[in-house]
Image (spheres, rainbow, N blue to C red):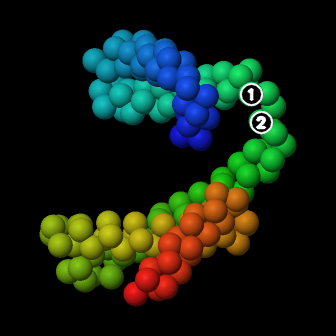
Amino acid sequence: MRHRIAALLARKNTLTPTLLSLASAAVYLAVAAPLAPTIGLPALAFANSLMIIVHCILMYIVLSVTIGTLNIRQQLDNLWRLALASVGMSAVIWGLLRNLPSLNSVYFSDGTAVGAFTTVVVIGLAGTGVYFLLAALLRIDEVRMIGGIVGSRLRKRRAQG
């Protein structure tokens, strides 16, 4: 979504993303207002998810009309790779959530603040690591781009230091 907004901003078009954000916010209000009193917090999470999805779809449509085709075949190819990396990350997170508390360690106990903190940190780092590892193995373009940027900055720092 950020790439789509940046593409419009690069064309000095700031009004369109703003109007689309307002339309997305209207979707949020249309869903959250009637459902929140009865369902509660899950209604807000659902409304937020729907708002983000609508915003992405609207931005995609507007950008397609503005600059032409966006190579849907390549995007679908990347989408299944992202989904596969997400499934792998989710499996690792789920497995750790089920098994870390059974270690009977104070560091992974649900009853202490330290246990909750270390559980979140360990699971977060493991999930992030697995996601980026799978994304790199699946050759997701954006991950390779991030790797190139980080690598070039590290090389610059070594050359300066």
Which residue occupies the foreground of this view, 107 or 99?
A: 107
| Amino acid type indicated by mark 2 | Leu
Q: CA distance from mark 1 to mark 2?
A: 8 Å
Q: Do we see residue 70 in this rendering? A: yes
Classify 148 as above or below 63: below
Mark 2 = which residue? Answer: 70
User: Looking at the picture, does residue 77 appear above or below residue 12?
Assistant: below
Location of residue 21 in the rendering, given as x and y in whole percent from the top left corner: 47, 22
Q: Position of residue 11 (x, y in %)?
A: 61, 28
Residue closest to the far right: 73
Image quarter for residue 147?
bottom right
Q: Is residue 53 visible?
A: no
Residue lying furthest front in this view?
Answer: 160
At x 33%, y 82%, the residue is 103
Q: Quadrant of the C terminus?
A: bottom left
Numbered tag placed on residue 55 in the rendering = none
Q: How many marks?
A: 2
Q: Residues within 10 Å of mark 2 (few under 14, many from 20)?
A: few
**Mark 1, mark 2: which one is toward the viewer?**
1
Callout 2 secondary element: loop
Of 155 and 3, which appears nearest the observer? 155
Q: Nearer the viewer, residue 144 or 8?
A: 8
Pointers 1 and 2 in contact (CB under 8 A)? yes
Q: Position of residue 28 (x, y in %)?
A: 42, 20
Quarter assignment of residue 32: top left
Name which residue type carries label 1: Ile
Residue displayed at 53% across by 81% down: 155
How many neighbours does mark 1 have within 10 angstroms: few (below 14), some (14-19), or many (20 or more)? few
Q: Is 157 rendered above or below residue 75?
A: below
Q: What residue did someone put label 1 on? A: 67
Q: Quadrant of the N terminus?
A: top right
